[in-house]
Structures are given as C-alpha cells and as structure tokens.
Amino acid sequence: MLIGVRAGFNRAAFPDDSRSMRGAWIDTAWQRLVEARNPDGGWGYTAAHASAAEPTAWASLALSAQGVAQEHRRSGLGFLANVQRPDGGVPAVDIQSPPSWTTALAMLAWRLAPPQRDTHREQIALGASWLLSHAGKAVPFNPTIYGHDTSLIGWSWVEGTHSWVEPTAYALLALDAAGYHDHPRVVEGRKLLLNRMIPGGGWNYGNARMFGAALRPFPGTTGVALLALRDHPADSGIEQSLEFLSRELPGVRSPLSLSWGIMALTAWNRRPADADAWLSETFDRSAGESCNPLHESLLLLASLDACPLPINGKSAEVLHG
Amino acid sequence: MASRASSSVTPLPSPLTKGGPGGGPGGVAPSPLTKGGLRGVSVGPQDPGHLKETHQFSRREILGVGGALLLGGGIAAGLRWAGTDEGGQRADVFIGKAASYDTDLTAIIRDGLSTLGIGRNQIRGKRILLKPNLVETATGHAHINTHPAVVVAAAEVFRRFDAADVFVAEGQGHRRDSILVLDESGMGRALSEAKLRFVDLNHDDVESVAKPTNWTNLETLYLPKTVLAADWVVSMPKMKTHHWAGVTCSMKNFFGVMPGIVYGWPKNVLHYAGIPESILDINAAVRPAFSIVDGIVGMEGDGPIMGTPKHVGAIVIGRNLPAVDATCVRLMELNPYGIPYLQKASGNLGPIHEANIAQRGEPIATLRTRFQMIDAPHLRAAASA
C-alpha cells in the first residue's frame, strides 16, 4: 500500500469556513485513509482487515470533514447502506448473529457525511427505528455492589444486556443528529450517562463504583460521554470531567483516547493549545505501520477547529460561547 | 471431555445466544437461584458481571470425601462432582521461586518447561501466542496486569527453542484503547525493545467456532482469527482475587481473547451467560497449550482492578489450566473447591484435587500466603481455606 502525499492533488475546498488544516500529517493521513479503502467500499479495522461498520462510518465522516472527493465518502456510505438489515440495524461485523451497536455510527455518517443532505434519509429513519426499539437491560439494584442506578435505560453493546457508556453515547449522538433531541429515550439516555459519572469526574466503560470502591475514569470514554452531553449545563460533575481530560491528555499519545478527548474539549470550548502538536505526534507514532482507519479517522476529526458533531442543530460556539 | 447440556434456562434475547433477539419472556432466565441458603447467593441472571450459580459446599464435599454428589437443580442440573479421582485426570504443575521481576525469569521459565517435558522438540516451528492480562491499566498500579518482564522472558524462552513466531495478543475487557493500555502498563515499551509484535484481539477479524462444550447457552463463540491461527496459545495471567469469580488466573484470562467488537466493553454477554460457564466454554474452544502465571506480585482484596499488591514470589507453569489455577489458589491460601469455575472444571477440563496434581519445583508450603478477599456472601466458600 502506497503511503505518502501524492504531488499535485487538487483537493476540494472545505465546505465549512470554520474548519482548517493543521499540520502536514493531515494530508498524509487522509491519503492513507483513501488508499486503505477496501474494494467493497468500506474500511476495516486495519488496512488488511475485512470492512466493518465502525471504521467505515468514521472514515466517511473524516473524509467528508477534510473535503476529500465525494467518491470516497459515497463508497463508505454505500457500504453501510448495503449491510443495513431490513430491521434497520447495522451489524458491527459480518457474522451470523452480529451485535448492532454500530447502527448509531452509521446514522451519524449518513446524516453528516453525504454531499447532499437527505441522500440517506430512509436509512437514517430505519436506523432510528432500530435504536428506539432496542434498549439496554435494567437489573435489580443492589447497593452493596453497584454504584449506579441500574434501572436507567440506555443502550447496550449486545442486545439483551446492560446499558453502557459508549453505546449509549453513540446512540445519543446519532438520535440527536437525526432530530430526536427531546425524545424520552434520549432524555433518559443522558440521565444514564450523568448517573454513570465516576465520583470526582470522568467516565470509564460504565461502572462508577463496584463494591463500594470508586473506579477510575478513562480519557476515551470520558470524551465520548462529554460529547454526548455537550448541551448539558456545565455543572460541577461536567467541570470535574473536563478537568480530568485537561490533566490526562498531555500524557496521552494514543489515537482513540486523544481524539475523543480533544473533540470533547473542543466541543466544550476548552481545546488545549497544544492539541495539534499532540495529534501530530500521535499520528507520527504509527506512521511506519499500515493504516488503522479507525484511529486515523478519529485523529482527522480531532484536528478540526470545531466539533464535527453538532448537537440539537447547534455548534459548540453557540452552546458554550 | 464431558459435554454439559444447558439446563433449564430460557435463552437470553441476545443475538449471540440460542433463541436470538426477542426470545424468551423479556429475556429473563428463570433462574432457580435465591439469596442465601444452600444455593448460595445470586442477584439474578440479569445482573451484569455476576455468577449464575453458586453452591455452598458442605464440609464433606469440600474435603472431597465420598463418591459423586449430584448438585442442585437449575443451572447445575446434571453437574456431577467428580470426586477425588476426577475421572483419572492428572497433571503436573511447576512452581518457580522468583523474589522479584529482576530475577532471571528466563531461566525459571525454561526450567519449568523442561521439568514439564517441554523443550526444543515440542516448540520448534510453532507459532506461539502469549496472552497476558491487561484488562485495565492505570499508571502506578502495575499489580493489575501481567508484568512485562514475565512476558518478555517467556518470549525469549520460546524463541531460543526455535519457535517460528512469538507474539503477544490481548483483547482487554475494560479499556478499548490498546495503545493507551500498552503505554500505561509499560508493556508497549518492553515489547518494542524485545521486538515483539502486539495484536489487538478486540478489533481482529473473527470466525465462528462451534463450542466443544455447552456450559452456556451461547449459540457459538466468535474468536479472533489470530487466536485460531496460533499453534500454541499460552495464558499469561496475573495471580489475582476477583470480586465475582473468586480468582482470576489462567482460565479467566481467556475472557480477554473474546473480541470486543462482538462482545463489548465490558464483555457483558459473557456475564449474562454465566461467568464460570463462560470460562469453561471458552477454554474448551481455545484449547490453550500452556499457562505461565505471574505470581511474583499478585493482587488481593477487591480484584481484579481495585485490589492491593500482594507479594508471593512465584511463577507457576503448567499444561493443564485447571490444575495450574488450583495450585495458584492454594498458593493464595484460598479454597479451590469454593471457586465455581474450578468446581465445574474438575474432572472435565482437568484436575483440581491436590492428590491429582504433581507439584514440581518449589512446594506450595514454602511460598503460600493468605490473600484477602472482599467480604461478600458469594465469596465466602472461596475464602474458607
């Protein structure tokens, strides 16, 4: 696989004046991403892997945000449409009985990435129908064991299991983008995320306390949760979570955690001054390896001046001035 | 090995279980479990991360006296206590003494393999996958994870024995970000210096594998292709207590081969399917060749994450994982018969009775040290050594 910037490429202008390129790594990254696309139009978790919904969704969004030629976005969006099932679910992997937590990510891509706004209206509606008809399982509360309200309903990784932070946050982002900002499921989903916040701020996968001990937050899931909650008032918990990210990210050079963290801080108007340098260093760490479409897509999205995921139709500047 | 049919549990409405989405009455398995009493403690099958079944063994059962005992109904229907003979299964387990991670671990591991009859003839040409425990990392909390020095030492031994390929792979259950996990644990730097590659099993291509056993109602297992392509899968766990399973060691370590893109973070569907049952089905499917346990500094208390460091000074090695884990539990001065997955493994996947395990190297008595557990009803049998 060729790696490197092709001389003389005439890239389309960015669709949004608020976005700008930062760093030479960006050209290399989107070039690698384009070249990592599989013949079926999707992207795998690495360049050598079979296409999967998650990296395809993020690659489509990243290439759209970078203003890359439409054919690449269309191919990814088309792949996602092809794998969507009649019930609206978008399977995470091509297996006989797949989980469909990636439905939300496909919806985000269809909603935000296509050249024309309503290109995938039908797929979005089907996906929303699937999300709204699937829910995480509540469990009986035991205060000696759990530190969260186990009756709140969000979204699970696998149908028939408990609700967790990441799939719930993805669902909230997708449903919001599709116009369901005030839907009762979305309202409860936000409540669930707030309830799963770890004492002192931040989120891990979704257990705040176990057997009385407060667990430790992770920068990646903290970023995802803060993105999903970014029109929530900046109360003490949110502030502590933002501070956690601000403390942690200077020492983080891994694509997933750094990207989610920077996108969240950007959405909350706290983008670190050195964010671009960190993103560049992080990309450089993997420059000698084959493309990881998920990682490099998220790095590209995090390179944007503004959060690429609007909430309730508003940008971060409008929400948090 | 014996195959256990699923008991009278309504399939959970998961696409990964028999019955599929929407099957069963709201997905609630009609668990026979009750709080307290002879059935032990359960908070219901819906509870994430909890056991489906425990059994309060009588003293007679714990001592292994008498013949086969038919345990209670429900999930345990058909489960037979194998008794002291354990179906004739026997195993050798080696204990090496290692005061610290600066000890010559390569020599200890080589000696352990040699004692167990493993040398160049058995390893030459093989593709060896080393599976450490990196479930969740935190800077300054090295006791959560398999120490990089043990992994690098094991790799060195396999390389010296002319393995065709030696690499490290993990699908950590809590933190999705493998690179951050490698950074925070120090494993990334150690692997880089040793020129060992790392494979992220959570995001690997997967393949459906028919289960050789039916401890759970999972319809099938999806394993990473990297695992299936390896000739030897070597479990390299940390010796730790576990607030659900009792202990986490060689066998529980294989939750970490189940890909997160299928099973999630955490791998909650395995908790719903039953932790002990999932451990057995996964181990039967993966068929690990070996275990090398980092018991130099383990974890006691609220394992597997929030516990405290506990020095043992041991490297435990063996080809039969129930036997290795039972040995580790004895080193921890806990009760192997009080660990549900070991109860179920006994006489099925391997022996756990001390008389059926040939202890090589250091005797347990010279290194054993009491591991504290959190005080929870479902752990009291394990703590009753």
Image: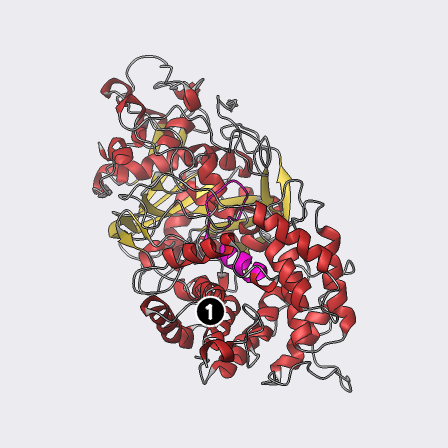
Q: Would you call the spot at circle 1 few (<14 residues within 10 Å), some (14-19), or many (20 or more)?
A: some
- At 25% from the left edge and 38% from the top edge, which residue is drawn? B376
Q: Nearer the viewer, residue A226 or B73?
A: A226
> Is residue A102 in sight in this rendering?
yes
Residue drawn where x is 38% and y is 15% of the image: B70
In the rendered image, residue A31, in percent from the top left (x then y), is placed at 70, 76
Chain under callout 1: A
Residue B151: x %, y % from top left: 43, 55
Residue positioned 70% across, 47% down in the render: A85
Quadrant of the rendered image containing residue B369: top left
Query: Identity of the amino acid at label 1?
Result: Asp
Coordinates of residue B48 in the picture (x, y in percent)? 41, 42
Q: Specify the quadrant that holds the N terminus of chain A.
A: bottom right
In the current view of this chain or complex, which residue is farthest to the top?
A: B67
Q: How is the image coloured?
A: secondary structure
B360 or A170: nearer the viewer: A170
Is residue A46 among what the camera can see?
Answer: no
Numbered marks: total: 1
The answer to whether residue A250 is magenta is no
| In this rendering, position of residue B377 left or right of residue A299 | left
The picture places residue B283, in percent across and down from the top left corner, at 49, 36
Q: Which residue is under mark 1?
A: A231
Towards the viewer: A146 or A107: A107
Q: Secondary structure at mark 1?
A: loop
Name the side, left or right, on which B40 lies relative to A115. left
The reply, left or right, for residue B349 in relation to residue A87 is left
Which span of residues is magenta-colored? A155-175
Q: Is residue B295 above or below residue B287?
A: below
* Nearer-the-camera pick, A93 or A311: A311
